[in-house]
Image (tube, grey):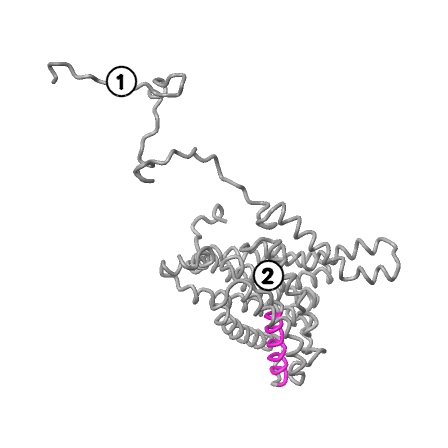
Amino acid sequence: MNRIAPALTGTRRTIVFGAVLTVLAIAGTFGLDPYRNFQLATIVAYFCAVAGLTLLVGLTGQLSLGHAALMAVGGYAYALTANLATDWGLDGVPRFLLGMLGALVVSTVHGLLLGLAGARLQGPYLAGVTLAIAIALPAVTAQFSGVLGGDQGLQIAYEGVPEIFSRLIVVEQWHAWVSILIAGVVVTALAAVRRSALGLKMRAVRDDETAARLSGVPAARVKVIAFTLSSVAAGAGGAALCFVTQSISPGAYTLAFSLLLVVAAVVGGLGSIGGAALGAALIVLLPWLVGTVTDAFEMSADLEQRLSGNLGLLVFGGLLIVVMLARPGGLASIGLRRGRGRTAPPRSPSPFGPAASAAAPTDSPADEADTDRTGVKEVAVHVPTERER
């Protein structure tokens, strides 16, 4: 992108690059059939959540095992707000925008509260709190079944293709468009944060929180902001998934799915937006590929029932082990070059510090000529004469 538009730098470059990728992804939907567009919409919804998780874990070191619950928060908020808009007589784009607004507001508040608690916790304690949220989700929906629908969840009104696009695309492609637009806005914002001064503060807190505080970085505030941004991204992904499936239920956001999101972020590459996209694609495509392969073989009904849903997780776990052994940085590190050129050989340390070592001149060819076979340079010593004395 720098070669194409060298004048674009910083946030403007990130926004332009994100807009170009969004347009290309929308154009790519014309080459897919309805089922592939549905898969693409699902991948993009997961992409929002995994991107927020990789920002949280990769840049600040805060481990969250309950991001599926954060997706559910956004999905339920979208469904409730959209159904309320339907009762008010709204439909189409106004209902969608109102539903997204409700999802973002509720996700922001939820992430802020979790961030305030998480700023005082570290390591397994923070992971335990987020894990408890993921485990408590079914109980919460059952306790408030009158509002959240219990185990059956909530249904939203059918979202068809707008009249202006009705002759151009089908409903699955329209859902893919909406999901891509949501992800384009959310992920571009996360990428801008990653490259900003706030992103540098997050890395400082991750590397050494005590040193960051001594340098004037408000570590607690940075952690809260990171958790809030990650929650908003997950909530937007949950809202997009609710828009695509036109329903939401607690059975879709289990503890296993929360752990799968973490594995996707690790396999893709923590801290990498491109790695988050790869991880989200693996969540959707890997079980489908495993199912396609197993369907090609004849097996008993008992064995097929045992493998259904479990073989995909087994393959995903094996992939995690292989990637961590071969590429600890994740799949995103495969295309990275280890270096951009040969570096100069290190010089011996100077007793006067780094500045003196950097300023010390290197040996000239004449000096090298004065070196004998033992590697020791000949030094000419001047002895003063009697007159000079």
Tell me if I can see residue 250 in this picture.
yes
Q: Nearer the viewer, mark 2 or mark 1?
A: 1
Quarter holding residue 346: top left
What's the magenta region?
69-87
How many numbered badges does the structure rendering display?
2
User: Given the image, on which type of amino acid does mark 2 rest?
Assistant: Val
Label 2 SS:
helix
Q: Is residue 41 magenta?
A: no
Figure quadrant of the C terminus: top left
Which residue sits at x=36%, y=59%?
214
Q: Which residue is mark 2?
A: 50
Q: Main secondary structure of the magenta part?
A: helix
Residue 79: quadrant of the picture: bottom right
Residue 187 placed where, x, y %? 54, 61
Q: Residues within 10 Å of mark 1 (few under 14, many from 20)?
A: few
Of mark 2 and mark 1, the one earlier in the sequence is 2
| Nearer to us in this view, 313 or 383 | 383
Label 1: element kind:
loop
Establish if 340 lies above or below 258: above
Question: Horizontally, is 294 left or right of 160 in the view?
Answer: right
- The amino acid marked with disc number 1 is Ala
**Residue drawn at 38 percent across, 17 percent down:** 372
Q: Nearer the viewer, residue 187 or 275?
A: 275
The numbered mark at residue 380 is 1
Q: Is residue 86 magenta?
A: yes
Q: Is residue 69 left or right of residue 212?
A: right
Residue 234 in percent (x, y) is at: 58, 67
The foreground one among 119 and 40 is 119
Q: Residues within 10 Å of mark 2 (few under 14, many from 20)?
A: many
